[in-house]
Amino acid sequence: MNQSAEEELFKARFEEHKDTIYRLCLGYFQQNSMLAEDALQETFIKAWIHRKQFREDANWQTWIYRIAVNTCLLKIKQEKKEKDKAQAYSLEPQVEFDDEKERKIQKMHQCIEKLQPQNQILILMVLEGIPYATIEETMGLSSENLRVKIHRIKKQLYSCISHGNL
């Protein structure tokens, strides 16, 4: 494939998947649009850099989701390290939201953060509306295993939201 055809194909794939990847990243970063935008850009930069490693017989959507998930997890680790350092030096109290809906959303994201990393990925993909078949392929799970895992994750989240524990 020549360079311009390769660029056009990549641009088309970017346009097709950018919104879904952005929303997936938003879920990881508790609706922080700046972090989600950074992760989105980093995801597609990595995809472009490593495009020659993509096997044409594979599903491109699954490949880009895996890159996005790995990028988000790496950024979360980096953010946590920076946040821990900043909190060690900060004396400012944390801002609380008065809006009930915002509290519920924050609580849900806090509970999702308490899940194991693979379970975080699964529930965020489900919340994003990604088809189960794509999730199965991305995560390497059978359909039965995926359904069982999602059921258990939902029970954990319900317990966390209701009682504060997983």
Image: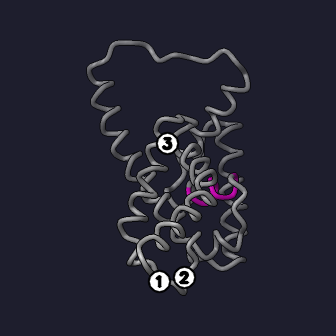
Q: In this rendered view, identify the residue nearer to me: 37 or 165.
A: 37
Mark 1 near mark 2, Cβ–Cβ under 8 Å? yes
Whole-percent x and y of residue 1? 45, 82
> Seen in the image, is 53 located left or right of residue 110?
left
Q: Is 20 one of the magenta-colored residues?
A: no
Q: Which residue occupies 58% across, 54% down? A: 18
Q: Main secondary structure of the magenta part?
A: helix
Q: Which residue occupies 35% across, 32% down? A: 83
Mark 2 near mark 3, Cβ–Cβ under 8 Å? no
Whole-percent x and y of residue 33? 53, 36
> Tag 3's secondary structure?
helix
Q: Is residue 97 above or below residue 77?
A: above
> Seen in the image, is 44 located left or right of residue 156?
left
What residue span does the magenta drawing correspond to? Answer: 121-127
Q: Residues within 10 Å of mark 3 (few under 14, many from 20)?
A: some
Q: Amino acid at mark 1?
A: Arg
Q: Is residue 89 above or below residue 68?
A: above
- Residue named by callout 1: 55
Residue located farthest toward the top when viewing the structure as drawn: 92
Whole-percent x and y of residue 149? 66, 65
- Residue named by callout 3: 37
